[in-house]
Image (cartoon, rainbow, N blue to C red):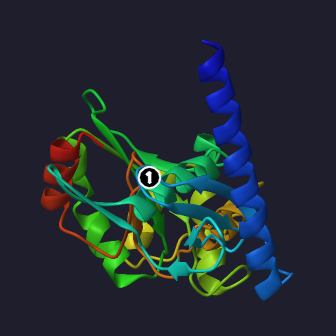
Amino acid sequence: MRWLIMLMMGLSQSVWADENKIRQSILGINPAIQILAIAPVANTDLFEVSLGSGERIYITGDGSHFIAGDLYQVGTGGVRNLTDIGRQADRLAMLETLDPSTLVVFSPKGPVKHRLLVFTDIDCGYCRRLHQEVETLLEGGVEVQYAAFPRAGVGSESYQKYVSVVCAEDPQAAMTEAKLGVDPDPATCENAVADQFRLGQQLGISGTPTLIFENGEMQPGYSPAAELVSRMNQQGS
């Protein structure tokens, strides 16, 4: 047992030494780079470095070589994008700050099998197209949760429309009317529209609709509702 403890201590010290070299190498390129975490990539000689910008790079233990881009693992089960798996975990952690009570939610009449978070804009054409198919999602047991992402930014006309929707007596009905092109009656209240927009920016969202699945996977753009239901049933997400 003593030899195992000594081995673990040696490995720990080795990883710590590698981390120091990696930090020195990266900060030597640019001292302003924010390093959030450094972790060894299993079964490789690489380390994954999470940066404050939301990016990931892969670097050798001595800090002499690095890769900027996605890292894939090839195995008997197929190809896995290890970088995107990390991104999914990051998204889920960031989404913990999202208050569900501030969302405009459409729930199925029966049991909820899946939840789909959609960052949406009132005036976005493909957002409206997706909402026209919301009944298909609901029939498939999918709860649709709308978060605000007025593409023109806080204070814009689309932003004001979204505020009016969430502040309406019936936000779900107001959302449906707005998605049909009917301007909502002006309304104000305490709301999280600006906070949701900023969260979307932090997630790297630039367009709408942007869909986030329960496993943290993010999809920019529209897909037919029937395809989304099938996809979630297959993935269990």
| Front position in the image: 79 or 226 | 79
As shown in the figure, which amino acid type bears the numbered disc 1?
Gly
Residue sitting at 81 percent across and 78 percent down? 27
| Front position in the image: 49 or 193 | 49
* Quarter of image, res 58: bottom right
> Residue 70, percent across and down?
42, 73
User: Would you say 42 lies left or right of 58 here?
Assistant: left
User: Would you say 121 lies left or right of 98 here?
Assistant: left
Residue sitting at 68 percent across and 26 percent down? 6
> Residue 104, percent across and down?
51, 51
Q: Residue furthest front?
A: 3
Q: Quadrant of the C terminus?
A: top left
Residue sitting at 13 percent across and 57 percent down? 226
- Residue ID for mark 1: 216
- Relative to residue 229, is residue 83 depicted above or below? below
* Quarter of image, res 184: bottom right
Q: Quadrant of the N terminus?
A: top right
- Relative to residue 15, is residue 194 depicted above or below? below
How packed mark 1 is, by other alpha carbons closer than 10 Å (few <14, some 14-19, many 20 or more), is: many
Q: Is residue 191 visible?
A: no
User: Would you say 160 lies left or right of 236 here?
Assistant: right
> Residue 21, percent across and down?
75, 67
Residue sitting at 71 percent across and 32 percent down? 9
> Residue 123, percent across and down?
46, 82
* Quarter of image, res 90: bottom right
Q: Is residue 103 visible?
A: yes
